[in-house]
Amino acid sequence: GAVVSQHPSRVICKSGTSVKIECRSLDFQATTMFWYRQFPKKSLMLMATSNEGSKATYEQGVEKDKFLINHASLTLSTLTVTSAHPEDSSFYICSAKREVTEQFFGPGTRLTVL
Amino acid sequence: GQQLNQSPQSMFIQEGEDVSMNCTSSSIFNTWLWYKQEPGEGPVLLIALYKAGELTSNGRLTAQFGITRKDSFLNISASIPSDVGIYFCAGPPVVGSNYKLTFGKGTLLTVNP
């Protein structure tokens, strides 16, 4: 149990385009999901908390208009990187909260913006 | 914000050796989580600790929640090549924070066959 999937696993796009990343909890319902960004050889940086049925909560310094989050159901959250630029290239990882404090992570999405 | 100090930053060991890594914080944590991340993958939860003093094992892995609630350690016994990866400690340091996790900077483990 506690499986979280992400799609796509890799995406390459041109500068200025928008990219949508999906995060699904496959065998449990998650009212709360989280989106992280990770740079090479660095730790995970929390970008935002995705709440089912309400607006996402963004961490300080994260542009909410650039990183759009939609938590449409108890098993799906999406992150859309709008008007992507090369500096947005990174490894994006989602997680879903199952128990009080346990978070289970997806396999990540490698975004490369040319 | 809350910070977790994780050490060592990296370790190079021979197969069969035991490994120990730890995390400390200046503030109290209510939960300690240990994750392993392999290249190009998301972190995988290894052990979750919920009570001060708690000692929990998962196969060759053993982790403890420090009595002061400001530290935790992870031990790996009889290491094997597939133990290679980055190990992160993490926890939600403040009750009512919607369970946002703070991560340590990770310990990169390399196991030589």
Image (spheres, coloured by chain):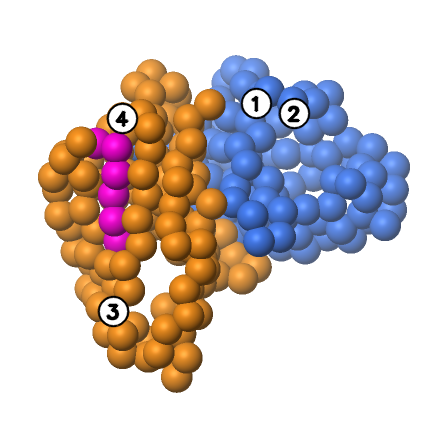
Q: Which residue lies under the disc numbered 2? A: A62
Assess disc 2: are there few (<14), some (14-19) or many (≥20) residues with their C-alpha within 10 Å of its C-alpha. few
Q: Who's the residue at 47% across and 32% down the image?
A: A33
Residue A20 sits inside the magenta stretch: no
In the image, residue A25 sits, relative to residue A108, either above or below, namely above
> Looking at this view, is A97 or B78 the one in front?
B78
> Looking at this view, is B94 or A24 the one in front?
B94
Q: Which residue lies under the disc numbered 1? A: A59
On the same chain, marks 3 and 1? The answer is: no
Q: Which chain is drawn using orange?
A: B
In the image, residue B32 sits, relative to residue A111, either above or below, namely above
Q: Which residues are magenta?
A: B69-74
The kind of secondary structure the magenta stretch mainly shows is: strand
- Where residue A82 appears, as percent x and y from the top left, is 77, 31
Q: Nearer the viewer, mark 2 or mark 3?
A: 3
On the same chain, marks 2 and 3? The answer is: no
- Where residue A103 appears, as percent x and y from the top left, is 38, 39
Task: For the residues labelled 2 and 4, say whether their Cβ atoms are less than 8 Å apart.
Answer: no
Q: Who's the residue at 53% across and 32% down the image?
A: A46
**Which label number is shown at residue B28?**
4
Assess disc 4: are there few (<14), some (14-19) or many (≥20) residues with their C-alpha within 10 Å of its C-alpha. some
Task: For the residues labelled 3 and 1, say whether their Cβ atoms are less than 8 Å apart.
Answer: no
The kind of residue tagged 1 is Glu
In the image, residue A72 sits, relative to residue B77, either above or below, namely above
Taking the image as shown, residue A113 lies to the left or right of residue B19, namely: right
Q: Chain of mark 3?
A: B
Which element type, helix, strand or loop, lies under badge 1? Answer: loop
